[in-house]
Amino acid sequence: MDIEKVSKLARLELSEEEKEKFSKQFENIMKWIDELNETNTDGIEPIFSITGMENNLRNDREEFFGNRERIIKNFPNREYDFAKVKKVIE
């Protein structure tokens, strides 16, 4: 896995030591995912809730966040106070 690409996408600045450490960790994670992909799941129904409840999702509610300016300053590309992103819908 290309740690440079991942860190850029996550907007992380990593030291050389961190890059080496995380590269090894990502490699182990990818091996584990490969093992999971090899598991035969034929005939097994998907589980949508491990608690057995129909709806265990939280209710949406509005919460006040007091440091709006700090978030806006972190936008890599903005127009006024809005994050500006590439067009994804044709």
Image (cartoon, helix red, strand yellow):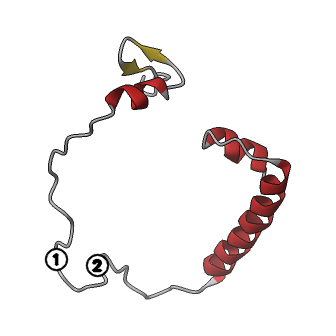
- Disc on the earlier residue, 1 or 2: 2
For the C terminus, give its image quadrant: top left
Q: Which residue is mark 2?
A: 49
Q: Is residue 32 left or right of residue 67?
A: right
The answer for how far apart the CA atoms under marks 1 and 2 are is 7 Å
Which residue is painted at 83% across and 55% down in the image?
17
Kindly identify the amino acid type of the residue bearing the numbered disc 2: Ser
> Could you say where residue 34 lies in the image, as x and y percent from the top left?
69, 74
Residue identified by numbered label 1: 54
Residue 61 in the image, given as x and y percentages of width and height: 14, 50
User: Quick one: quadrant of the N terminus?
Assistant: bottom right
Where residue 33 sits in the image (x, y, percent)?
64, 73
* Residue 45, picture quadrant: bottom left
Most foreground residue, 47 or 9: 9
Residue at x-position 76% and y-position 50%: 3
Residue 71 placement (x, y as % from top left): 41, 31
Label 1: which secondary element: loop
The residue positioned 62% from the left and 39% from the top of the image is: 11
Residue positioned 69% across, 45% down in the render: 7
* Left or right of 56 on screen, residue 27: right
Q: In the displayed structure, does residue 5 sit left or right of residue 10?
A: right
The crowding category of the residue bearing disc 1, from other C-alpha atoms within 10 Å (few below 14, some 14 to 19, many at least 20), is few
Q: Evaluate if marks 1 and 2 touch, with contact meaning CB atoms under 8 Å apart.
A: yes
The one of 78 and 86 positioned closer to us in this rendering: 78
Amino acid carrying label 1: it is Glu
